[in-house]
Image: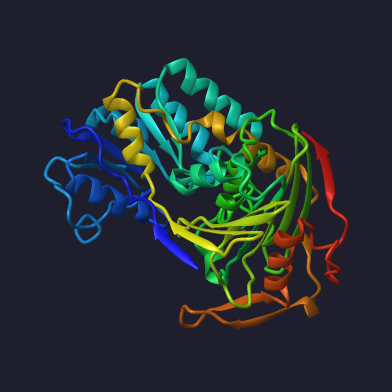
């Protein structure tokens, strides 16, 4: 097998004064952004000037940053006003994304908005309209779309390396323990009571396909070239849950695009043996497998040996900084328009019937990696997920005893 490294990770760019950045949501997944900011600050690209958290970060959490002028506040708008930030990173609970994005837009502050960008298509359109009206740059945090492997795979398919494209299938087999669903009030929820006491509910849609393995959906759509809100014609979902939650933890979605291509994603957070998620592009004379967290591509085609390559990745915050430094000449990798098709999937899942609770004999509890915690394992889930990506077929079509025919909507 040939193995080659194509490029290195690209976080460099035009050298200018460090861009002042505010981070909203610095714990949980926000720690990833904090670490990323630390590296970009050391490279002179950015300067952390504010942190928006209900409980201020301590010295250990801010290790490596210049904290003399750093401001911490639970009021996002006030923090932007006080710091004069040019960029805000929003890594807060899903239902808050749209409103906080609009708070930043009103102040002319550019955005790195964590995925999913909104909990419904209406909220996504409201966010995108507000961003466009304000004339700010907005990058949505699908880090996998910064991988240089995405264009490499697209080029291979365009050049006929695997013959006629037949479809795209993704597989994600991860594990999450019960503590994962207790980490926040919105975790594992489809909706929550609104905080204003009116009795209304707000959408959350924190399911396996819309949050933890959302990259599998977005990356599959990107490889197919169906990224816009009008690019999907039908969406069929199979939503299940083994855990005692509202949302789905083991699910399948099947998409038909306006060009007639087929994209499927099967995912679980109840894997027996968790592994790296991947996307398979099927062709009449071969296939391409892309492990998107590793930037690794495997090409298998008729008449040739397997070829593996590892690619670099452009950091999305660094790309946003470059976009601003070049007055827009450096294009954003993931502007809101590129997430329209993904948001159609979120909307289909939001409107689908509540996930089907799997029968007790379909899963079991096993010790989790975290001491004193357990996690639920769906028997055979790993195999079903892999078989789905291979055959572009849902759990029901694969004969899973607990599966039922899915719900189909026209997009």
Q: Position of residue 201 (x, y in %)?
A: 66, 41
Query: Is residue 34 rendered to the left or right of residue 372?
Result: left
User: Which residue appears farthest toward the left when viewing the image?
Assistant: 68
Number of numbered discs visible in the structure rendering: 0
Q: Observer-nearest residue: 181 or 312? A: 312
Q: Observer-nearest residue: 367 or 53? A: 367
Residue 345 image-quadrant placement: top right
Q: Observer-nearest residue: 284 or 148? A: 284
Query: Is residue 128 rendered to the left or right of residue 261?
Result: left
Q: Position of residue 154 (x, y in %)?
A: 56, 42
Residue 347 image-quadrant placement: top right
Give the residue displayed 35% in from the left and 47% down from the top.
53
Residue 32 image-quadrant placement: bottom left
Q: Observer-nearest residue: 318 or 210? A: 318
- Where 369 sits versus 122, above or below? below
- Where 137 sits versus 240, above or below? above
Give the residue displayed 65% in from the left and 33% down from the top.
121
Query: Is residue 39 rendered to the left or right of residue 253?
Result: left
Q: Split into 4 quadrants, where in the image is the C terminus?
A: top right
- Where 244 sits versus 106, above or below? below
- Where 270 sits versus 162, above or below? below
Q: Visible in this render: residue 74?
A: no
Give the residue displayed 21% in from the left and 61% down from the top.
60
Q: Position of residue 271 (x, y in %)?
A: 63, 72
User: Which residue appears farthest toward the front when viewing the image?
Assistant: 303
Q: Position of residue 149 (x, y in %)?
A: 47, 49
Give the residue displayed 26% in from the left and 31% down from the top.
85
């Amino acid at each position: 097998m040939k193995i080659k490294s194509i490029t290195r990770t690209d976080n460099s760019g035009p050298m200018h004064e460090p861009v002042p950045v505010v981070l909203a949501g610095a714990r949980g997944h926000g720690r990833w952004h904090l670490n990323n900011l630390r590296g970009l600050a050391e490279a002179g690209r950015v300067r952390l000037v504010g942190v928006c958290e209900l409980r201020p970060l301590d010295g250990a959490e801010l290790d490596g940053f210049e904290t003399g002028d750093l401001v911490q506040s639970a009021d996002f708008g006030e923090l932007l006003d006080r710091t004069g930030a040019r960029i805000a990173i929003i890594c807060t609970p899903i239902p808050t994304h749209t409103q906080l994005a609009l708070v930043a837009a009103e102040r002319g502050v550019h955005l790195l908005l964590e995925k999913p960008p909104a909990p419904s298509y209406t909220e996504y359109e409201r966010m995108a309209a507000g961003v466009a009206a304000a004339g700010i740059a907005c990058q949505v945090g699908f880090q996998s779309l910064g991988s240089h492997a995405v264009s490499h795979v697209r080029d291979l398919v365009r050049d006929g390396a695997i013959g006629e494209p037949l479809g795209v299938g993704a597989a994600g087999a991860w594990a999450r323990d019960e503590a994962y669903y207790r980490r926040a009030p919105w975790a594992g929820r489809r909706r929550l009571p609104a905080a204003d006491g009116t009795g209304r509910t707000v959408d959350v849609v924190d399911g396996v396909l819309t949050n933890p393995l959302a990259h599998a959906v977005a990356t599959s759509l990107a490889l197919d070239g169906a990224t816009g809100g009008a690019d999907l014609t039908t969406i069929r979902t199979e939503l299940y849950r083994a855990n005692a939650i509202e949302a789905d933890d083991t699910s399948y979605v099947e998409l038909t695009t306006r060009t007639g291509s087929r994209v499927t994603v099967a995912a679980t957070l109840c894997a027996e043996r968790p592994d790296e998620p991947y996307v398979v592009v099927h062709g009449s004379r071969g296939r391409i497998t892309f492990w998107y967290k590793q930037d690794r591509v495997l090409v298998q085609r008729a008449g040739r040996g397997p070829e593996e390559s590892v690619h670099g990745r452009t950091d999305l915050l660094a790309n946003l900084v470059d976009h601003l430094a070049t007055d827009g000449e450096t294009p954003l990798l993931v502007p809101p328009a590129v997430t329209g098709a993904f948001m159609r999937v979120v909307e289909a899942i939001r409107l689908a019937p509540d996930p089907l609770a799997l029968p007790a004999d379909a899963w079991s509890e096993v010790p989790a990696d975290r001491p004193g915690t357990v996690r639920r394992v769906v028997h055979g889930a790993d195999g079903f997920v892999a078989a789905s990506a291979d055959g572009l077929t849902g759990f029901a079509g694969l004969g899973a005893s607990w599966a039922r025919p899915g719900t189909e909507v026209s997009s």
